[in-house]
Amino acid sequence: MIEEAPTPPAIPTPASSLRVWQVWARDIFISLAVSAFIIIFLYQPVKVEGTSMMPGLTDQERIFINKFVYKLEPISRGDVIVFRYPLDPSKSYIKRVVAVAGDRVRIDDGQLYVNSRRVRETYVPGDYVDTRTYPETRVPEHAFFVLGDHRNLSNDSRDFGPVPEELIYGKAVFAYWPVDKMGTLH
């Protein structure tokens, strides 16, 4: 049996060092491009400001919104949406959809009714219910009636009316900070 002499280790050349940097640069560029695509077109991180969606979402909580989902499915009752504030589109709001286009919505002494049926809102704790009344209103086409979950601290459709569809730009889908609140949103 013939033994072969061990191959000496390769000495890096300027060409091989350049190749390593080219691979790294390519990988970083691809990662940044994919990340930018995801953030611009699919998911966007946002920070909740205010307490109108407590207890589900708290002030300074970080969430991801899906910016593409409403191209595939309609906005539905119960969705937590992010939209441009109708009275000042430079601001963004986050609220829950309680009625969709064509629905009749009213609030009697804090109790929500949609199409003459009482809505059981398990996401609104008793301490957060207010006693305001809102007259029956039909939600116009391409608009949504939205309310904050913390009813006695929320500026919502009771104050500024239904939200036009073109102002809605995402659905809140996942909380990621603080870590103890991490998970899908309902």
Image (cartoon, rainbow, N blue to C red):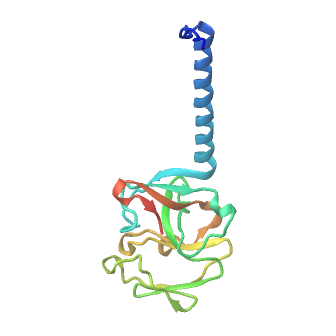
Q: Nearer the viewer, residue 109 or 10?
A: 10
Q: Please, which residue is most extreme toward the front here?
A: 1
Q: How many marks?
A: 0
Residue 2: x %, y % from top left: 60, 11
Q: Residue 141 occupies which quadrant of the picture? A: bottom right
**Quarter of the image that includes the N terminus:** top right
Which residue corresponds to the image point at 40% horizontal and 88% vertical from the top-left?
A: 109
Q: Residue at x 57, y 30 (%)?
A: 28
Out of 88 and 100, give the one closest to the viewer: 100
Q: Is residue 37 above or below residue 56?
A: above
Residue 62, placed above or below residue 76: above
Q: Which of the pair 175/17 is nearer the observer?
A: 17
Can see residue 92? yes
At 65% from the left and 63% from the top, the residue drawn is 70
Does 113 sit above or below residue 141? Answer: below
Q: Nearer the viewer, residue 167 or 82?
A: 82
Residue 130's x, y, as percent? 36, 80
Residue occupying image coordinates x 38% and y 72%: 150
Residue that sits furthest to the bottom in the current view: 116
- Residue 168 horizontal side relative to residue 159, left or right: right
| Residue 136 in sight in this render | no
Relative to 151, is 104 on the left or the right? right
